[in-house]
Amino acid sequence: MSLKVVDLGVARGGVPVLEGVNFAADPGEAVVLTGPNGVGKTTLLRTLAGLQPPYAGKIILPDAEAIAYAGHADGIKAVLSVRENLSFWARVYGHGDIQPALEGFGLIDLAERPAGNLSAGQKRRLGLARLAVTGRPIWVLDEPTVSLDKQSVAMFGAAVRRHLDGGGTAVIASHIDMGLPVRVIDMTPFRARASVSRQYDEAFL
């Protein structure tokens, strides 16, 4: 399933940060967004995930429920075990088998441990494992390798590769080499100009 953005403009805190963003991500393809801190990568990903509206342009998706988003928060319940966390999300998304997610993210030996007792890296792996139980074809990921060691980065890269091999798509904000064939798009040329910011402000005065 393809994702396409056309002349997209996104804002953070009412201030435009990116404008004129155009790209497509097709089945089996990973697109990596790069650029300096603060350029607007997170804002763009949140907009793609439907967490905030764009101020210009459009996002083209065949299915509004196609995207699974993983941001900076891991989205786990500390009092539930690893298995219970994944089982909860599997029920939410209608996919009952969590075993591939446990295996793919190295969580088999941690399955019965309360999530609150995990290390930062283990929590991150659990948070990312949620993607594998959603059944959604487009993964939108914001700095997914934060808190992961080298082995876990490789594990995550393998999980993304399996997703792509199955016809999935991934859009990832990252500066880390995950060992994947990717198409890199630098967000720097899409910085919003001051004139765009003024137009945006005037439109809402």
Image (cartoon, rainbow, N blue to C red):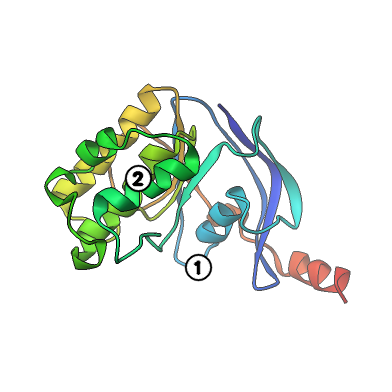
Query: Which residue is located at x 16 percent, y 43 percent?
Result: 108
Identify which residue is drawn at 45% across, 33% down. 135
Specify whether 71 is left or right of 101: right
Q: Position of residue 202 (x, y in %)?
A: 86, 73
Amino acid type of the residue tagged 2 in the rendering = Ser
Looking at the rendered structure, which numbered label has been put on residue 105? none
Q: Are marks 1 and 2 in contact (CB under 8 Å)?
A: no
The residue pinned by badge 1 equals: 38
Q: Which residue is depicted at the point 76% across and 64% down?
A: 196
Local secondary structure at mark 2: helix
Q: Which residue is identified by label 2?
A: 87
Say which quarter of the image contains residue 154: top left
Q: Residue furthest bottom?
A: 205
Q: Locate residue 145 relative to residue 42 in the image: left or right.
A: left
For label 1, the crowd category at 10 Å Cα-Cα, with few meaning under 14, some 14 to 19 and many 20 or more, is few
Closest to the camera, between mark 1 and mark 2, is 2
**x and y, in percent, of residue 121 in the image:** 21, 59
User: Seen in the image, is 127 located left or right of residue 158?
Assistant: right
**Label 1, label 2: how far apart the Cα atoms are:** 35 Å
Q: Quadrant of the N terminus?
A: top right
Local secondary structure at mark 1: loop
204 above or below 25?
A: below
For residue 145, say whether it is visible: no
Give the side of residue 78 with respect to residue 169, left or right: left
Q: Amino acid at mark 1?
A: Gly
